Amino acid sequence: MTNAALFARACEVIPGGVDSPVRSFRGVGGTPYFVARAEGAFVWDAEGRRYLDYVQSYGASILGHAHPLVVAAIRDAALDGTTYGAPTEREVLLAELLCARVPGLEQVRLVSSGTEAAMSAVRLARGATGRAKVVKFAGCYHGHVDALLAEGGSGVANQGISGSAGVPAAAVADTVVAPYNVVPVLDDEVAVVVVEPVAANMGLVAPVAGFLQGLRAECDRVGALLLFDEVITGFRLGPGGAAEHFGVRPDLWLFGKVIGGGLPLAASSRWSTTTGRGRRPAPAGTRSGSTSCSRAAWRWRRARTR
């Protein structure tokens, strides 16, 4: 079976022929390659062609594909059942390990994707502050949460404009988009400022000196929360992620990709001062803290630590 034939079949039963738009190759032309298997630094497509894989599932497979430790952990976990809808020791172990590694991190809520983590963190910020407004930066991607799909373009840097069809204006009415690497002036209606500490969805853009420190100071000035989206940077810039690397502590974190060791796992995380007022936000999920994902993630994190 050729890549072209598989893509043609996929287009009949999957919108656009892929389950995530970036895989369609529309931005670069050509036909997507369909992966048959992967090992280490390589993937093989349906036609048997081998590729040196610089993508590594967009950073998720930091140990490479099919690492023996991760495969063994998944196999062991599967023998005990795949999903319970109940808490397990494995998610406690993983949460303890994450909290031990990230300076200031005190609690973790495990979910299945970075989008879920972002949705939960924004809700937590709004609940903790009693405010509605969210500030994000042009070019930064935080999953397909309606409120975070707003993007800034020339002349609309401070307006909430959705980057996707199907998102009503009301969903982004409380979203403000600012230029990356420029500290915005906040007001007392802002609940949270969401930022990739190193922007990784418009090429790779490092923060200029003082940018993250300036965000911390401006959030403190108006009582807003600072949220680091470390789905990309977490445990890649260093064992403690961007907070450790840049010496700036946010109030909330998002983790994903890397923490799952290649499995669907993410986390929204906080330190204790972000809650304590009003009703608790209520994120929930049947597979949150999945036993197989938690075991695999804990095993690879231990290996990475050593």
Image (spheres, rainbow, N blue to C red):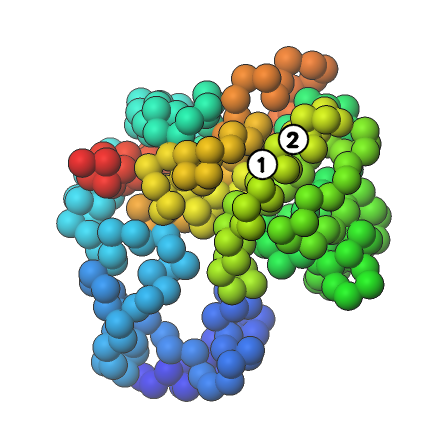
Q: Disc 2 to disc 1, how far (Cα)? A: 6 Å
Q: Position of residue 72 (x, y in %)?
A: 17, 44
Residue placed at 22% from the left, 46% from the top? Answer: 70
Q: Which mark is residue 213?
A: 1
The numbered disc on residue 243 is: none
Name the foreground residue: 88 vs 299.
Answer: 299
Residue type at tag 1:
Gln
Position of 258 with respect to 183 (left or right) is left
Q: Residues within 10 Å of mark 1 (few under 14, many from 20)?
A: some
Q: Are marks 2 and 1 in contact (CB under 8 Å)?
A: yes
Q: Tell whether 19 sits left or right of 305.
A: right
Q: Position of residue 230 (x, y in %)?
A: 48, 43
Q: Secondary structure at mark 1?
A: helix
Residue 238 drawn at (x, y percent):
34, 41
Q: Name the residue carrying label 2.
A: 217
Q: Residue at x 37, y 64 (%)?
A: 55
